[in-house]
Image (tube, rainbow, N blue to C red):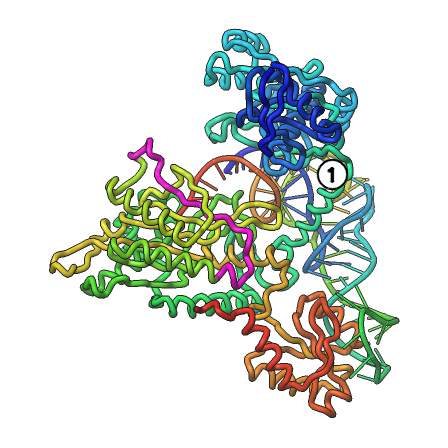
Amino acid sequence: MIKITLPDGNVREFKAGVTGMEIAEAISSRLAREVLSVSVNGEVWDLGRPITADALVKLYTWEEREGKETFWHTSAHLMAQAIEEFYPGTLFGIGPTVDNGFYYDIDLPGGQQLSEKELEKIEKRMMERSREKQPVVRQSISKAEAIRLFTEKGDPLKLELISELEDGTITLYSQGQFTDLCRGPHLPDTGYIKAVKLTAIAGAYWRGNEKNKMLTRVYGITFPKQKMLEEYLVMIEEAKKRDHRKIGKEMELFTFSEAVGLGLPLWLPKGAQLRGLLEDFLRKIQKNFGYDQVITPHIGDVNLYKTSGHYEKYGKDSFQVIKTPAEGEEYMLKPMNCPHHCEIYKSKPRSYKDLPVRMAEFGTVYRYEQSGELHGLTRVRGFTQDDAHIYCRPDQLKEEFKKVIDIVFIIFRALDFKDYTAQISLRDPGKPEKYIGSAENWDKAERAIVEACEEKGLQTRTELGEAAFYGPKLDFMIKDALGRNWQLGTIQVDYNLPERFQLEYIGSDDKRHRPVMIHRAPFGSLERFVAVLIEHTAGKFPLWLTPEQVVVLPISEKFNDYARKVSDELNFSDIRTVVDDRNEKIGRKIRDNELKRVPYLLVVGEKEEETGSVAVRRQGEGDKGTMTVGEFAGFIREEIKRQLTGLYN
RNA sequence: GCCGAAGUAGCUCAGGGGUAGAGCGCAUCCUUGGUAAGGAUGAGGUCACGAGUUCAAUUCUCGUCUUCGGCUCCA
């Protein structure tokens, strides 16, 4: 007998060789129906694999990520099986699970291409094989056997994978006629898969390297119930409605023009209004945190970026050099603001008493992004960073870092961003040649970040090897409507630029010292931030950020003058108001402005004009009753104040 | 940049070898109305661009551009 410890601490005895499925059956028949895989001492296994010694066991269902992964992993094999049946001789690369399903990289024989029209027939075949409930069989083989098998099959992709595996760890999984090299784990049989949707075909380089062969990647998702697939499809439709590109067009926030150029956004009046409000908001916070606003030009001498190292490192990702017509002097569209700020730092001698110096600029930068990578406002070639550089003494680093985290928190709170992740990016300890600066400085900087996050109680994930070449960093990420992760704010420590620009301050010892630099951009870029904000709110911005806060709706043309009077009065109190004086009935005006997501509608007619009042309607909530114009102004100001209370400390 | 898909009115989309349609929007007029679509009339398109096949191409073929979904990259 062996002892099986369950997650709740219960210990049960089973005969040696018991399987995950048998344990589930012993617990409840419902669990036995729903269980998909099992972890044994932390390693996820097939349900049918015998457990031979005492173990800590956890059973996974669809509710757990591990369960879904097992489910989708088998689904990827099922898809491969169906594809192989239609296209014998297809080579298979890798077929992993992703956040929403799985994919398989394939290479059809004779250079054939798969078209989206064929996905349906593959889906059908998958469901046929699923209904046959083909058992999935695990088989452990030696490396030599594996090599022989896949050499026979003529599959160079799998042979390449096998060459990197340790002998004794190689397993095959088979269902029906289909066999694949795979670590597993898998479902007991294909019958678990009740609904399938192949979602996309895309090209993907073998092993992600563009020098390698391009394979065909087929994406799909499967579910244990048909109804779940239907819900998923509805969810995708809903997400598409939140797409910032769609809402941005509808709400007239921004546009693109081929005539202007790829990836160069044009901010329309309402978008510019929104962006301006965000800038004002941050400017005010930064003022409270002791930042000085600076302004620098959009171009700079090439040598400036040679000094900073950006030319060497990112020259190929920048717009190419532009020249003055007569002298042939070389300039670049600025890809970064920091070199300019460093020159401001150098514009006069600095004392240790002057530090930290905090320089902020809404600096527009231009970078070359590959054409295929451009995406709405989230990926553009010209964008404005809410950039700032803090020059401080090494002993001030942690404190300054914490203050920047505070600013990020203020912004996230003001905009109700709750679902963010924070990632600390440190060096790859195995590759010191990738980084510049002394190991000692790196140690100090990494410690400062880790400690600052701990002291601020920030939940973080730490990634080794993700640091910039010049220093470690802390990034804030948020998901968009379609579940894609976007990086927003970033805080980076830099020992490199102060060195390259020979930045100095005079210490209390009357000697020259080198300051440390923090690069930080809590929004990241205004473009990307607005995009994420649109998707986060579905265009229903918080009142203080809404370009058009109030629309006054006269009941008939007779009351247009009164409506304009109300509008003027509110605008005078800094409440952004317009009049809808179209020749339409009131119901129509309400509908149109509701759909335009206007937060407050004021209906005015004979009664209101007589009493100097307005009938208030809140977006999505309906009639709120009547009040005087003055009362309404106070009411709306109060709401805005509530949204921003306490944010500025 | 690479792979795949798509481009028809301002927007959303239908259509199809014989030079085009709907709804919304827009314009003009009628209507002057009380909380989510009042009515009439009208303007608006080189069917992305360029070649080819054909008596005839918006429709079929190829190329280019742009957009979309991925890949790669991201200071």
Side of B61 relative to A459 (left or right): right
Q: Please, is residue A103 above or below residue B50 in the view?
A: above
Q: Residue A485's x, y, as percent? A: 54, 46
Q: Chain of mark 1?
A: A
**Residue farthest along the bottom direction in this orientation:** A610
Magenta segment includes A89: no
Over which residues does the magenta segment extend?
A: A411-433
Can the viewer see residue A217 in this picture?
no
- B26 is higher (above) or lower (below) than A301: below
Query: What residue is at 23 percent from the left and 65 percent from the top?
Result: A354
Screen quadrant of the C terminus of chain A? bottom left
Looking at the figure, which quarter contains the N terminus of chain A? Answer: top right
Confirm whether residue A524 shows in the render: yes
- The residue wearing badge 1 is A229
Is-magenta flag for residue A415? Answer: yes
Left or right for A358, reference A539: left
Residue A547 in the image: x percent, y percent?
Answer: 58, 70
| Left or right of residue B25: residue A527 | left
User: Left or right: where does residue A84 sit relative to residue A133?
Assistant: left
Residue A147 sits above or below residue A451 on the image: above
Within-10-Å neighbours for mark 1: few <14, some 14–19, many 20+: some
Q: Residue at x 67, y 79 (%)?
A: A579
User: Measured from the top left, where is residue A509 in percent x and y?
Assistant: 12, 59
Amino acid residing under circle 1: Leu
**Secondary structure of the residue carrying numbered label 1:** helix
- Nearer to the camera, B58 or A184: A184
Residue A554: give x, y in percent of width and height: 74, 82
Q: How many numbered tags mark residues here? A: 1
